[in-house]
């Protein structure tokens, strides 16, 4: 029950992309057939390119399933023995590129706290929630307490609602936090690490 696993880093910001968006973006740049050439992983000479393009999170099956979904949505078309991005796909690419190239949002100085107490019977949703909070730029403070600088994206709020976690999740807004400079330093360290990372990166699984 996780919505996306790829983080694209650009202009000192991170944008969460779905598998389909990632594949469409790469297909627009390099072509579907070139991406297909990087599977399976047994070719040792492709490891660096796979890492730079964020393909390590794609299994062969995931690649095929994602490609088929793009075809079903009319964003990619099969032509003879090749595949091509359609006009609709190019339109989607333009929207995606505008999102990636837009400047990072300005922080309003308010801290966002996310606290949750999800029962063991919903363990898989609890783990998915942790992944979504991390992908949204939130930092894990302790136990089930997370802190962020920006509001949670609408898709994360939708995930919380559709997974029936609303009564288990509490969101708070605060202008100050205890040991604020230490918390701010953690965010600075993470952003510095992200700026030196690959343009595409895989969201690490949460325990």
Image: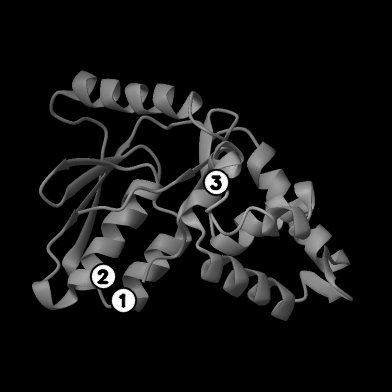
Q: Residues within 10 Å of mark 3 (few under 14, many from 20)?
A: many
Q: Which of marks 1 and 2 is nearer the N terminus?
A: 2
Front residue of 62 and 181: 62
Q: Which residue is pictured at 36% across the width and 28% down the height?
A: 190
Up-down relation of residue 167 to residue 92 (above or below): below
Q: Mark 3 points at which residue?
A: 54
Q: Quadrant of residue 156?
A: bottom left
Quadrant where the N terminus lies?
bottom left
- Real-space CA distance between mark 3 and mark 1, rounded to the nearest whole angstrom: 28 Å
Q: Which of marks 2 and 3 is nearer the N terminus?
A: 3
Front residue of 116 and 47: 47
- Real-space CA distance between mark 1 and mark 2, rounded to the nearest whole angstrom: 7 Å
Q: Which residue is pictured at 78% across the width and 69% down the height?
A: 76
Q: Which residue is pictured at 27% across the width and 78% down the height?
A: 164
Up-down relation of residue 86 to residue 46 (above or below): below
**Could you tell me if the residues under marks 1 and 2 are in contact, i.e. CB atoms within 8 Å?**
yes
Q: Residues within 10 Å of mark 2 (few under 14, many from 20)?
A: many
Q: Is residue 188 left or right of residue 95?
A: left
Q: Residues within 10 Å of mark 1 (few under 14, many from 20)?
A: some
Q: Which of marks 1 and 2 is in front?
A: 2
Q: Quadrant of residue 27?
A: bottom right
Q: Is residue 62 left or right of residue 126?
A: right
Quadrant where the C terminus lies?
bottom left
Q: What secondary structure is marked by label 1?
A: loop
Up-down relation of residue 204 to residue 36 (above or below): above
Q: Mark 2 points at which residue?
A: 125
Up-down relation of residue 84 to residue 41 (above or below): below
Q: Quadrant of residue 35?
A: bottom right
- The image position of residue 56, as x and y in percent, is 49, 50
Q: What secondary structure is marked by label 2?
A: helix
Q: Mark 1 points at which residue?
A: 163
């Amino acid at each position: 029950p996780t919505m996306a696993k790829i983080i694209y880093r650009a202009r000192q910001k991170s944008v969460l992309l779905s598998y389909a968006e990632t594949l469409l973006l790469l297909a627009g740049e390099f072509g579907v057939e070139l991406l297909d050439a990087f599977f399976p992983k047994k070719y040792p000479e492709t490891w660096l390119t796979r890492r730079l393009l964020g393909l390590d999170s794609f299994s062969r099956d995931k690649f095929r399933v994602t490609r088929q979904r793009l075809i079903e949505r009319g964003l990619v078309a099969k032509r003879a023995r090749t595949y091509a991005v359609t006009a609709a796909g190019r339109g989607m690419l333009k929207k995606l590129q505008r999102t990636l190239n837009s400047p990072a949002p300005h922080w309003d100085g308010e801290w966002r706290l996310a606290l949750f107490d999800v029962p063991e019977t919903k363990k898989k949703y609890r783990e998915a929630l942790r992944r979504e909070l991390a992908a949204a730029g939130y930092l894990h403070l302790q136990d089930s307490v997370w802190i962020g600088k920006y509001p949670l994206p609408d898709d994360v709020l939708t995930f919380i609602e559709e997974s029936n976690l609303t009564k288990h999740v509490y969101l708070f807004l605060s202008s100050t936090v205890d040991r604020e400079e230490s918390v701010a330093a953690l965010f600075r360290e993470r952003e510095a690490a992200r700026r030196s990372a690959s343009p595409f990166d895989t969201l690490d699984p949460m325990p």
